[in-house]
Image: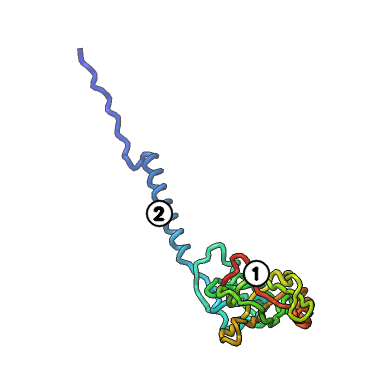
Amino acid sequence: MTVAEPVRTRRRAFWGDARFLLGILLIVASVAGVWFVVAAARQTAPAYVAAHTIVPGQVIAADDLRHVDVALGHLGGVYLSPDAWEEGRVATRTIEAGELVPADAVGAAESARTTNVVVQSAVDVPASVDEGSAVELWAAPLVEPGEYDAPRILVADATVVSVTRDDTLIGGGAAALELVIPRADVAATLAALADDSALSIVPTLGGGA
């Protein structure tokens, strides 16, 4: 009796295997994804950083800003760009030196709700208080010569523009400060200056520059 030889099936080429093709596609997709991420990270956009501390209400000039190219990704519209820059704009909040300038921290001059005043502090001003510091202005009304009423908060959200300290023996550590204050507090502040109230500067929590 003749034994029939087994039928040999042709082996399919490995490149015809669906799993092989799927693996190739996954590798290509992975490489393309990495390339896209790296390319996106390398893409930069022009923006501005503050050349020094800019205080609320300050008119921003060209020399107050430095042009930089940064990778912002989807945050591109959050920060001020050269395309959106206009002369005569003012800061609506404190912008720290070296900080990327947020678009919402700059507004039209007519939208400003602050003004500047100069006050003389009746007590020593902490060394931490400097340009850009957030402070409170307290006032103790004069009752009679040499006697003052209890102090109260006159301005709760002032920003320091500059501090001039008098460290001489005669000056006794007094300081004159230029402050940015809300327009709503101007009348009360001028009244306190006129009636010789004792004014004091108190840093707010975390308000040091």
Secondary element type, mark 2: helix
Secondary element type, mark 1: helix
Q: Amino acid at mark 1?
A: Asp
Quarter holding the N terminus?
top left
- Residue at image point 57% right, 70% down: 208
Task: Determine which quarter of the picture holds residue 116.
Answer: bottom right
Residue 83: image location, x then y, percent: 60, 76
- Residue at image point 58% right, 74% down: 126
Quarter holding the C terminus?
bottom right
**Is the residue marked by circle 1 packed among few (<14), some (14-19), or many (20+) residues within 10 Å?**
few
**Is the residue marked by circle 2 packed among few (<14), some (14-19), or many (20+) residues within 10 Å?**
few
Q: Is residue 24 left or right of residue 167?
A: left
Residue 15: image location, x then y, percent: 34, 43
- Residue at image point 65% right, 74% down: 201
In the picture as drawn, the residue positioned furthest to the left comes out as 1
- Tell me the tag on residue 104: 1
Residue 82 visible to the viewer = no
Q: Is residue 37 left or right of residue 97?
A: left
Residue 150: image location, x then y, percent: 74, 70
Q: CA distance from mark 1 to mark 2?
A: 39 Å
Of 65 and 56, the residue lying toward us:
56
Of 145 and 55, the residue lying toward us:
145
Q: Amino acid at mark 2?
A: Val
Q: Considering only order in the chain, which callout, 2 or 1, is on the residue closer to the N terminus?
A: 2
User: Which residue is tagged 2?
Assistant: 31
Disc nearest the viewer among 1 and 2: 1
Task: Determine which quarter of the picture holds residue 121.
Answer: bottom right
